[in-house]
């Protein structure tokens, strides 16, 4: 099983600031199979990034993804009030189970 | 637009069964694989099961293997999760999600979730 470890656990920032979220895998993950999701309480998870760096349909360009191998990053360039949520990375490749990281909570400072 | 709507959640005693449904609309359901994912209270996302577009292959997390069964009825555009021998640790919100094979298999659309509470 591929274990994904996200850091930090909680990130406290202000609107307008830049957020950098990290996801580290216990073994190499093909970039094609790494995604990022946003989750707000009571709402469905929302796909932000697939293939490590491709934005999903309708996702603003302030969200970007990068990385390869075992280290991946989600960057939000200028935080908007609606961006404060929990973010999960996930690997969905041929290695089942399809694991998620434990999440990074992005909170308003 | 793509819509996924779960139903069938509720409170159930340990050891009993429950079946969740996920009604799909806005896309050609029979062309897509589908997942179930759950989130226990205060916890993260946890993948449960996958079924291939035509039902020919099914995969499960070890934690539910032998107890849960994923199925689909493409004539009704509906995905199911039959949950037997339920345990307290199965308490969670259960989401259905579409597998987008055009985007390397990412989970691109999700339902709002159905709450399952296992308690005596």
Image: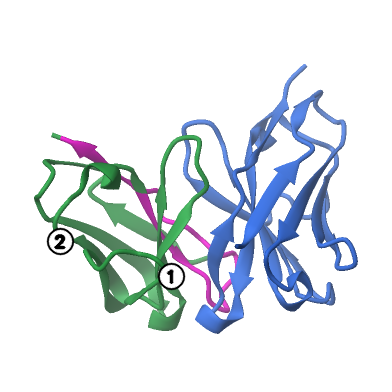
Span of residues in magenta: A87-108
**Which dot marks residue A77?**
2
| Residue B63 visible to an observer of this rendering | no
In the image, residue A101 lies in the stretch drawn in magenta: yes
Tell me how the rendering is colored. Answer: by chain
Q: Chain of mark 1?
A: A
Q: Is residue B94 left or right of residue B120?
A: left
In the rendering, at what x and y percent does residue B30 appear?
79, 74
What SS does tag 1 mark? loop
Identify the residue shown where x is 84% and y is 72%.
B55
Q: The C terminus of chain B appears in which quarter of the rendering?
A: top right
Q: Residues within 10 Å of mark 1 (few under 14, many from 20)?
A: few
What SS does tag 2 mark? loop
In the rendered image, the vertical position of residue A102 relative to residue B32, given as above or below: above
Identify the residue shown where x is 68% and y is 70%.
B27
In the image, residue B58 lies in the stretch drawn in magenta: no
Image colour assigned to chain A: green
Image colour assigned to chain B: blue
User: Whole-Å distance between the Cαs marked 1 and 2?
Assistant: 18 Å
In the rendering, at what x and y percent does residue B112 appear?
59, 44
Residue of label 1? A57
């Amino acid at each position: 099983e591929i274990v994904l470890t996200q850091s930090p656990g909680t990130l406290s920032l202000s609107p307008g600031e830049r957020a950098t979220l990290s996801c580290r895998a216990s073994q190499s993950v093909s970039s094609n199979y790494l995604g990022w999701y946003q989750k707000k309480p009571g709402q469905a998870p929302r796909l932000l990034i697939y293939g490590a760096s491709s934005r999903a349909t309708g996702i603003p360009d302030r969200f970007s993804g990068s990385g390869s191998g075992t280290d991946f990053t989600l960057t939000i360039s200028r935080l908007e009030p609606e961006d404060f949520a929990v973010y999960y990375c996930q690997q969905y490749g041929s290695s089942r189970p399809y694991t998620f990281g434990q999440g990074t909570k992005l909170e308003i400072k | 637009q793509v819509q996924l709507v779960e139903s069938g959640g509720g409170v159930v005693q340990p050891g009993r069964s429950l079946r969740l449904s996920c009604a799909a609309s806005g896309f050609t359901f029979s062309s897509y694989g589908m997942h179930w994912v759950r989130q226990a209270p205060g916890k993260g996302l946890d993948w449960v099961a996958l079924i291939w577009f035509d039902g020919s292959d099914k995969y499960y997390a070890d934690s539910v293997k032998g107890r849960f069964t994923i199925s689909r009825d493409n004539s009704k555009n509906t995905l199911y999760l039959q949950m037997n021998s339920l345990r307290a640790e199965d308490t969670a919100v259960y989401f259905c999600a579409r597998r987008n094979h055009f985007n390397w298999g990412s989970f691109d659309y999700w339902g709002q979730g159905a709450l399952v509470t296992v308690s005596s």
